[in-house]
Amino acid sequence: MADEARSRLGRGLASLIGDVGGEAAHLDRPRAQRKVPIEFLKPNPRNPRREFADVELGELADSIKQHGVIQPIVVRPVKGVQDRYEIIAGERRWRASQIAGLHEVPIVPVDVSDSDALEIAIIENVQREDLNAMEEAQGYHALANEFKRSQEDIAKIVGKSRSHVANMMRLTKLPAEVQAYIALGQLSAGHARALIGVPDPTAAAKRIVEEGLNVRQAEALAHVEGVPERKPQKARGGKAKDPDTVALEKRVSDALGLTVNVDHRDPGGTVHIRYRNLDQLDEIVSRLEAKG
């Protein structure tokens, strides 16, 4: 991949392939495109998107029947095989075109490495918000572990914060059963992050799904399951804390899903947040950043 193209990768798919991705580009830049038989294309086995809802494909197929494929499919040549292409971005359009009965589809061929192909696929899907949380997490994980990209690099590539990338990658540490709940949309990324570090995340996840708990409730559940019961807090000097301070501690603790200790002394005081691992610390930091 040319150095200039590589330097543009983090600015998005359109920048990488010369703005051929949008509708205006389809009309104004025919030089980069051509039509090929639909059977010349094959899916990318590394596509981070694994789930294609039948309803969505049907709706897109109806649109393609009326208007055609407005946005070309980004592909790369299959090595050693003439007139065969691997899809980098646009597998959903390719699948819907098959349903619509098209014989040819527009393509934009690019010459990229395996890592760049994965990056392009992630960029397109993340920018379109087409990936579920687990697919996004696994895509980041592949970039980091197989292609040695740092979290900072990945954040720049997809246009997200480093803390977002770090939080999503942690989802890959959860048990397979919990990851399945996320992939099916039964648990959100917020639900899943609350389960990181609890003794039995699978049981907690099952309870969240069965009881329909929201993220705050899931965080409170994780806090209860992950922290042993403690004796009532006392203020410095051995005196029991007043009910208002205890209530405030519970409120903040439930909101964070972590143990919180408030030591109030007029006119001020301190708030202590107890975290069990660096993952939880980073989660606290990301929440504070989000409030800024």
Image (cartoon, rainbow, N blue to C red):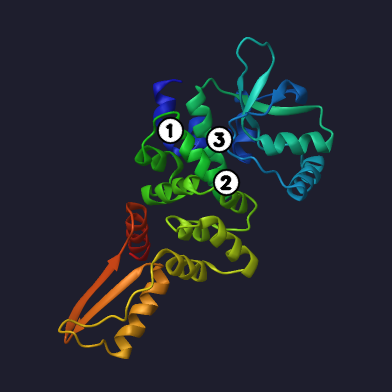
Q: Determine the secondary structure under disc 1.
A: helix
Q: Position of residue 176 (x, y in %)?
A: 57, 46
Label 2 packing within 10 angstroms: few (<14), some (14-19), many (20+): few
Give the image location of residue 189, x and y in percent: 52, 56
Q: Quadrant of the C terminus?
A: bottom left
Labels 1, 2: front one: 2
C-alpha separation, residue under disc 3 versus residue under disc 2: 24 Å
Other-residue count near label 1 (Cα within 10 Å), few / some / many at <14 / 14–19 / ≥20: few
Outermost residue toward the right in this view: 101
Q: Nearer the viewer, mark 1 or mark 3?
A: 1
Q: Earlier in the sequence, mark 1 or mark 3?
A: 3
Residue type for callout 1 = Asn
Is there CB contact under 8 Å for labels 1 and 2? Answer: no
Labels 1 & 3 near each other (Cβ < 8 A): no
Label 2 element class: helix
Residue at screen point 45% across, 55% down: 196
Q: Is residue 219 left or right of residue 68?
A: left
**Which residue is disc 1 drawn over?**
145
Label 3 packing within 10 angstroms: few (<14), some (14-19), many (20+):
many
Residue 167, position as x, y percentages in the image: 42, 51
The dot on residue 173 is: none
Whether residue 191 appears in this view of the structure is yes
Q: Secondary structure at mark 3?
A: helix
Q: CA distance from mark 1 to mark 2?
A: 19 Å
Q: Which residue is mark 2?
A: 176
- The residue mark sitting in front, 3 or 2, is 2
- First reached walking from the N terminus: tag 1 or tag 2: 1
Type of residue at label 2? Answer: Ala
Question: Circle 3 sits on which residue?
Answer: 121
Amino acid type, residue under disc 3 in the picture: Ala
Residue appearing at x 46%, y 70% in the figure: 220
Answer whether residue 18 is visible to the viewer in this image.
no
